[in-house]
Image (cartoon, rainbow, N blue to C red):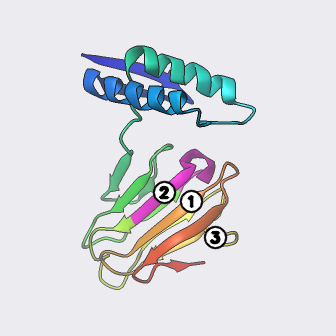
Amino acid sequence: MTDTFTGGGKSNNFSDEQLAEAAEMIKDMLASGRVLYNTASASALSTALSQMIAAGSTMPAPLVQELTASGAVTAGVESLELNHATVTIAATIADAVNHQGIFIAKATTEPGVGGDHTVTLTSGTWNGTATIATFADVNDALAVYFDSAGNGTVISNIGSVALS
C-alpha cells in the first residue's frame, strides 16, 4: 500500500515499509529527548511528524531531473543531470529558493563540440555573486547549499565548473 502526504507545495508517496521505518526513527529520536526542530514553523513540522508517525512515513527520495535539451529545471529538483553529447544544454532555474538545501548539478556527457552546458539562476546565486554555472567537461559537477533566501554556498566543485 502507498500513502500520499501533501505539504510545502509537494505531494509524496510512501510505501508501508518506508512509513514504518520513519515512524520508528522519529519515535526513537523523541524518546531520547533530542530536539528535532526549533523555529517559528515548528507547529507545521509537528503536524507533518504526527502524520508520519501515525502512518509510519519516511522522507522522500531525492528528486532528480535529467535534461537532454535546453529548458527549465523543475521546482523542487535536488539533482540535475545535463545529458547531451552533441548539443549544448542551457538550463534555467527560475528561483533558487525552490531548491533549498543541497543541490547538485552534473554534466553526465561531454557537451557539444565547441560548446559548454550552462545552468543559469534567474533569482538567487551560486556563491553570493555568480548566477551562471558553466560545465565544460563530462563529469563536471557542482554541489551547492541554497539557504531559505536562495543564496548559495559552494560545497564542492568537481572538475572545472566555471561560475560567473
The residue where tag 2 is placed is 103
For the point 51% across and 58% down, which residue is it? 92
> The C terminus is located in which quarter?
bottom right
The residue where tag 3 is placed is 127
Can residue 95 be found in the magenta stretch?
Answer: yes
Q: Position of residue 111 (x, y in %)?
A: 32, 76
Residue 145 has which mark?
Answer: 1
In this view of the protein, can residue 112 be seen by the observer?
Answer: yes
Q: Are marks 1 and 2 in contact (CB under 8 Å)?
A: yes
Q: Which of the marked residues, 1 or 2, is nearer the chain's N terminus?
A: 2
Q: Where is residue 141 in the image (x, y as percent from the top left)?
A: 40, 71
Q: Tell which residue pokes out farthest to the front in this image.
A: 32
- Identify which amino acid the numbered label 3 is placed on: Asn
- Identify which amino acid the numbered label 2 is placed on: Phe
- Identify which amino acid the numbered label 1 is placed on: Tyr
The mark total stands at 3
